Amino acid sequence: MVRFITFEGGDGTGKTTQIRSLESHLKKIGRSCVVTREPGGTALGGLIRKVLLEVGDHEVAPATELLLYLADRAQHVNEVIMPAIEAGNIVLCDRFTDSTVAYQGYARGMDLRLLQQLNDFADRGFRPDLTFLLDCPVSVALSRTARRQSAKGPREDRFEREKLEFHEKVRAGFLKLAQAEPRRFRVIDALRPAEETAAEIRDIIDQELR
């Protein structure tokens, strides 16, 4: 039974849009669901998210960044994800452990084995049943992010200020993770219009829930 579904991908790939679309679909077919995100899925996580994404020009050491994400995840699993699943809900989560591996591992260059051990500690070995990896060229994703920021105002988070090479490493990392676990991952072409992407995701979910 599919109970825990995560959405992964680089900035600008449309994760938030697709989660909202799937949430609407699940409600229409009578399935209860809980939508959450990392970082920031709890009250404590909201404070951690603010520290991680809105520190301005202050440099955050890679180890500090990693430990903050792990603290957020430990609280998130304990407070939100596991209780929601135990109550019979389907959980839709915007980012989970795969983002830690892609960003802090493949892009920041931290040891992948260490990251796996730390992820296991933070999430108690809890893993998604299904992961949608929204994938598109980095140049397209970053242009979407830039348009979104121009509509909201000049503020941007630390990751959006990273160089193109960083985001390319993130994308490559996600694709390696998907290749290593083809039964869990579904790689979705996010270059298409949002509704086409949503339709593919709905079809996959309908098949999984039968």
Image (cartoon, helix red, strand yellow):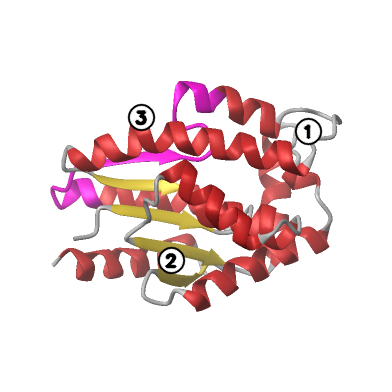
Viewer-proximal residue among 31 and 146: 31
- Which is more N-terminal, label 3 or label 2? 3
Label ID, residue 197: 2
Q: Residues within 10 Å of mark 2 (few under 14, many from 20)?
A: some
Q: Which mark is residue 183?
A: none
Q: Secondary structure under badge 1?
A: loop
Q: Residue at x 39, y 38 (%)?
A: 77
Q: In the image, which is nearer the foreground, mark 2 or mark 3? A: 3
Labelled pair 1, 2 in contact (Cβ < 8 Å): no
Amino acid tagged 1:
Pro
Residue hosting label 1:
154
Label 2 and label 3: CA atoms lie apart by: 31 Å
Do callouts 1 and 3 mark residues in contact (Cβ within 8 Å)?
Answer: no
- Which residue type does callout 3 highlight? Glu
Q: Quadrant of the N terminus?
A: bottom left
In the image: residue 175, left or right of residue 53? left
Point out residue 168 in the picture as x, y percentages from the top left corner.
Answer: 74, 66
How far is disc 1 from disc 3 in space, using C-alphas?
A: 34 Å
N-terminal of the pair, mark 1 or mark 2, is: 1
Q: Is residue 188 left or right of residue 49?
A: left
Secondary structure beneath dot 3 equals helix
Tell me which corner region of the image, top left, top right, bottom left or bottom right, holds residue 201: bottom left
> Looking at the image, can residue 85 be seen?
yes
Q: Which residues are magenta?
A: 26-46
In this rendering, the answer to whether 200 lies above or below 70 is below
